[in-house]
Structures are given as structure tokens and as C-alpha cells.
Amino acid sequence: MCELIGLSASKPTDLCFSLTGFFPRGGITGSHVDGFGIGFFEPGGYRDFHDILPAARSPVARLLCEYPIESTIALGQVRQGNVGETCIENTYPFKREIGGVCWSYVMHGQIERPETLTLSGRFQPLGSTDGERAFCWLLDRLYEFSLSAPFTFTSPQLSAALHIWCLQLHEMGVYNMLLSEGSRLYAFCSKRLTYITRRAPFGQAALKDNACELDLDAQLDPDMVATVVATNPLTDEDGWVCMTPGELAVFHNGEQVELLKDKRRAS
Amino acid sequence: MCELIGLSASKPTDLCFSLTGFFPRGGITGSHVDGFGIGFFEPGGYRDFHDILPAARSPVARLLCEYPIESTIALGQVRQGNVGETCIENTYPFKREIGGVCWSYVMHGQIERPETLTLSGRFQPLGSTDGERAFCWLLDRLYEFSLSAPFTFTSPQLSAALHIWCLQLHEMGVYNMLLSEGSRLYAFCSKRLTYITRRAPFGQAALKDNACELDLDAQLDPDMVATVVATNPLTDEDGWVCMTPGELAVFHNGEQVELLKDKRRAS
């Protein structure tokens, strides 16, 4: 399996502290050694970094812990492959452009019979993971949605549609995922996903996976609101929320702006 | 303007030596300080690295000089912006997927009235450079080509078509570019582009932009054939070939396999 990490923030901020706690899960505190990747939506565009070395000993991962890249949205993964070999093209995040907008995506889980997800051909996988096939299937849906409805990223119709599509994938196995177009961070919990929303006063935080403590008040702008999403909590703070399977949380400017629940489950 | 770098090799090889000579052009020996990027086609897939800091002082560039990423094709740029602000989304290389194949692209030049390049909408720019619009226009052509003809990457029809499209862009200004789908490296010279093809015995090479000399015979597999493309020669070796404006050179496994000339110019 894999572990995911995500960020939504009201102002560009670096993710060095969180990554210092996350990357050890790729080979030291976790066995997710089949490469990793992380993408950043910065004020001037999107870029991502990938490596096939375990994150715990990759020079690319070390750079990302030391070089502060300031983004409002980030999403990444340390990979433990089940479907698809260990290689760059199977390493998340994956990205594609729709209508001049860059969509980026990471997934953790396993879909049974991914070949039953019919693709239009407009978006085709570059690698051989089930998760990339599901991404292309979602992109087909997003593209159709953009043609049939006024395509605004703040549209509740879009969140509702995304939730339905995620629930379909959730029914095919385990499908935890993070998705973004640079404005909203969509987080779908199929089995396990947690998040923490931080606002002033931030207090202290100690990483669970690394002997590292940070005075967040000294680091963060007091006006900042920031949510960090992770498969498992990264710090010893109390505020980590464990999502319920079937939930889609939507984050914008660091705040949760929507939470869609699986009604079939609730009834 | 900008400077370009490219690699085609018969076996995966790292580009650290060439990048050690290339990156100083982003702020020390050259004034191309508006960010840089480089993409690698490795045996297991494609990845790229970008930064908006000048290459001469970017931690990402330093990593790429020290961390040997072995690829058979690479292409990159140090940018001095003329159209489009300095930001990640205007930083080459750009990539898109067609039919499950990743195309990557860098450009150096300036196109007059890029808005006259009509786009289908299938591929849309993420940034605001003339070069990305030209890329999307080329992708439209490549996609149409893939529908109308058996789409093999070794097809001389494809090279001939690419040459015609590049000549059209060349007529709109200055359009030096490198393009690849991971098998062939296409290098079009509009104004200035050079290359060197190295084979055993390789001899010594000293960089022009950095006090660094390398015994290539000690570094390279004697069976290796490798071509390095650059806007201006990177080393003091004799073998650098200066391309003629209007030429499209096609490299495969390190060798030049086609050279298409501008017949109008020759006549």
C-alpha cells in the first residue's frame, strides 16, 4: 500500500516540517520504499518531484525537506507498490491538463478489475497502476462535466459529482485519494485518511516519525490557516481528525468548505 | 532568450557533467536567470525538474549536477524570459500525453503573433509563453497525424511532417526547439543549435563554463554512443556541429538517424 500527504493553506507556505516527518515512512518508520512523489501548486504554477529511491534515503526527498517551496496546495505519496512495477511512470502524483487547468492526483489503495473502468481515450495512462487508470477515468468524467455544466471550481455540483465517482471507485476496492486543480484540495477517504486544520495560536508540534519539534507560532504567519492531510497523523497534536470511509472533504484556503458523506452508509 | 540542452544516448547515462557546464549559463557565464527545467526519459518513465531561481544558484540545479539520473533522452532549458512572466508555469520543459505516450518539449526563441496559431482546445497552454502555445499547436498536429496514419515513432512521414510544422513556426520568428516521446530526440534549428556525437575512444573534455575536466573514457561504457545538443557548445572538444537554420535533426540511440533540410533555402 502507500501513504498520502496533502496541504491546503490560506497563504503560500512550505511543507518542509511535514515532509521531514512523512519521508521516513518510505524506508525507516514505514515500508513504503517503492519511490515517492510530491506536487506543489505555487502562486506561479504547478511542479512536481519524483524519485524511485525510497524517500528515506533519496537525495530528492532530502532536498524537499531543506528547500522551502511555498505552495497553497500540495499532494504527495510514498509508495509501496502492489499493482505495477517500481518505476518513475508508476510514481504519483500524476497530472493532466483539462481546458488549460492542471489537475494533479495521488491515490492509496487497490482497485479490483480496473480494466472494467472504460476510458474514452482522451486521457490514457502512461504507467501500469490501477490508480492511474482510475485517474484517467475521473478525468473523462471531469471533462464531460466541463462540457455539460458551467465549469466553476467552487461549484457544489462538481463536489457532488466527484463524490459519486469516488464512491463508485470505493466500491471496487480501497480508494483513498487526493485531487486538486490548484484551488481546492479534494480528499476522499475509502479506508484511512486523517487531517488537521491549524490556526493561531498554533502551539508546538513534535513529529511522530522523526526526532523533530517545531514552535509553529514562530514559523507561521498568525493569519495563516492550513490543513495538512495524511494517511496517518504526522505529529503528536490533538487536532487530527480521522475521516469516515465514504467521505469527501473539500479544502479551500486551508479551511474545510464541504464535507460530503456516504448517505447509503448513514441510512 | 534562452539556452537549450538535449541528450540522446544508446544506453542510460547521467548528464551531470554537461549540466555542470550548462547551469552556470543561468546567472554566471550567461544571463538566463528566469528559471530552468530539465526532463529525463529514464528506462522506467519520464520525470522533470523545474525551478524559478537562476540555475547558477538553485538547490534543484545543484542536486541535478550531483545526483546521477540515468536517461537515454533528456531535454532542458535555462530561461531568459521575453514573453510571459518568470514563474513555474512558464518554465520548460512542458509535457503532454497523447495516446498513452508522454511528449516533452523545450523551445528557445520568439514567435510573432502566436495568437494566430489556432488551437483545437484538446491541448491548452497552462502558462503564457508563445512557446507553449506553439507546443499545443504541434500537439494538435501530432494528434491528427496519429489518427490519420499508423503512428509509429520511427516513421519518416512523422519526421517529414514535424519538419514542415517547425518550418511554419520558424517563419513566424525564431523557433529553436527540442521534442521527444522517449525514443527519438527531434532538434529543430531556427537560428542556433549545435551538437556533438561521442563514441569510443571518447578522450578528454573540458567545460567552457566551469573549471571542470573529465576523462570521458574512464566514465563512459566503450559501447556507448551519445549525442549532446546545446544552443552553444558546452566543451572544448572539436566535434561540435553547428546546425543550419531550417534543419531538423532526429537522434535515436545516440546517433543522428535523419537530417531534414529546408529545401526552399537550399534551392
Image (cartoon, coloured by chain):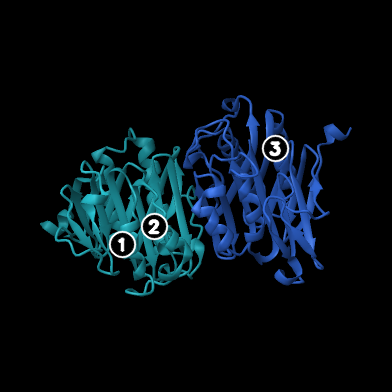
Chain colours: A blue, B cyan
Whether A99 is drawn above or below B61: the answer is above
Residue A138 appears in which quarter of the rendering?
A: top right
Q: Which mark is residue B175?
A: 1
The reply, left or right, for residue A177 in relation to residue B249 is right
The residue under the point 25% across, 40% down is B157
Residue A179 image offset from top left, x and y in percent: 64, 47
Q: Earlier in the sequence, mark 2 or mark 1?
A: 2
Q: CA distance from mark 2 to mark 3?
A: 36 Å
The residue under the point 54% across, 56% down is A62
Q: Residue under label 3, please give it.
A: A166
On whether disc 2 and disc 3 are found on a single subunit, the reply is no
Label 1–label 3 contact, CB within 8 A = no
Q: What kind of element bears circle 2?
A: helix
Label 2–label 1 contact, CB within 8 A = yes
Q: CA distance from mark 2 to mark 1?
A: 9 Å
Q: Residue under label 2, please give it.
A: B134
